Image (cartoon, coloured by chain):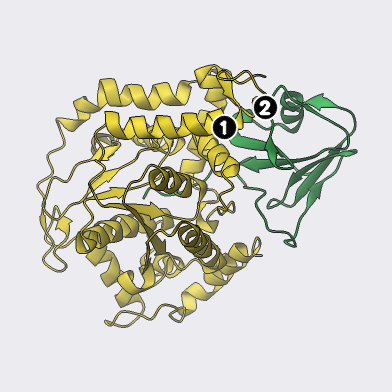
Chain colours: A green, B yellow
Amino acid sequence: MGSFDPRRPGGAAPPGRATFWYSLGSMRVVLRNQGREVEISGRRRVKELLAELGVLPETVLVIRGRELLTIDEVAREDDVIELRPVISGGGAA
Amino acid sequence: MKCRKCGGRAVLELRRHNTAFCAEDFLAFFRRHTLETIRRWKMFTRDEPLLVAVSGGKDSLALWDVLLDAGYAAAGLYLDLGIFDYSRESKAKCQAFAGERGARLLVVSVAEEVGAGIPHVREATRRPTCSACGLSKRYIMNKTALEGGFTVVVTGHNLDDEAATLLGSTLRWDESSLARQTPVLEATHPKLVRRVKPLFRTSERETAAYAFLRGIDYIVAECPFARGATSITHKELLNRLEDVSPGSKAMFFLNYLDRARHLFLAREQADLRECGRCGQTTTGEVCAFCKLADQVRRARGSEAPAATEPADPPAARGLIADLRAASEIHAP
């Protein structure tokens, strides 16, 4: 598994765009723009999932389908979870 | 987790406010918070023509969405930085957003104004990319607003942007930057247009959530030049603090405005005059933007403004190719 970099945005890619995955088990955690996937076996709370991946909750939106998840929600084994980084920028305008 | 307002299922927790909201109540909270900021900081009135600087990212499009929904006369300004696919994709998103809402969008090419797109400016001037880009943006925003009769330029800078900038200025003890950092930059010269930041109390996670829940199609890919930028490192550091102590970012920046900025403001006495070349404001004879454009033209071996897609100088070809490739990684 590659290291997770929360400042690299993921998600929002239109269908058909190249998608890459982290891989660990059956729950799939996706960062579309980052080129990584994690598969994780077993249910766990979003908070635990983020801690496991070393992601600070403040740096991402946790997306399941068309809904956002709070940190106390439980992600299930068959879920596809997108972690969409929210950090942007570089120079002041 | 339950919504504080309605008791329904929450979709977003806001740890610094010790609360959580469902989608509908979060959207209402976001709009109310933004409009209250505009009123409380006297940023602009409903009668003023606004020019909203839009990049295609979550912050500026979320802000434009709120302003249009609230009935403000808000035109968009997209600055085409010439950063390959990144610029093409972000421009398309701004045009689609404006088209769906029937809003007016002005598009200005940095290459036409400066003499080259941002990747080439970096090569021509050896100035840090984000610095040259920021200078060009501020200049063009002000000039476009003046020429178009807009009284206010509105930007999507959020709390994270402002706190990271403050951290950077503080680490350098840059008194001039500290004095200038404010959510309302008043027009202190007839050639300056007021510049305001209505999202300065809103975290970028909140603006991302607003954009997602509103179905706004924004560009998620970051600018290829932002990778490794110091400001991003500052944001990461602040997010670590925020994780341990929610509210740290807001305390750092908002308390600076309340308690410390006036100490630096007293020392800042800028004597503005008009640039002898372009007529925009400057503290010297020739403004920084004109100097930048001169550098670009000299380096590119022509006094005439370059075309939108100028040829790369030999020394730049390797880097330009790298940047183009980096920009294309996430292309559709």
Which quarter of the figure is the N terminus of chain B placed in?
A: top right
- Horizontal side of residue A91 vs B301, given as left or right: right
- Horizontal side of residue A3 vs B138, given as left or right: right
Q: Amino acid at mark 1?
A: Glu
- Dot 1 falls on a residue whose secondary structure is helix
Q: Is residue B44 above or below residue A32?
A: above
Q: Residue at x 74, y 52 (%)?
A: A35
Residue located beneath label 2 in the image: A70
Q: Amino acid at mark 2?
A: Thr
**Number of marks:** 2
Q: CA distance from mark 2 to mark 1?
A: 15 Å
Residue located beneath label 1 in the image: B24
Residue B65: image location, x then y, percent = 45, 47
Front in this rendered view, residue B103 or B204 = B103
Residue B164: image location, x then y, percent = 43, 36
Kindly identify which chain the residue marked by label 2 belongs to.
A
Kindly identify which chain the residue marked by label 1 belongs to.
B
Front in this rendered view, residue A66 or B194 = A66
| Dot in front, 2 or 1 | 1
Q: Quadrant of the rendered structure where residue B122 is?
A: bottom left
Residue B59: image location, x then y, percent = 47, 45
Which quarter of the figure is the C terminus of chain B placed in?
A: bottom right
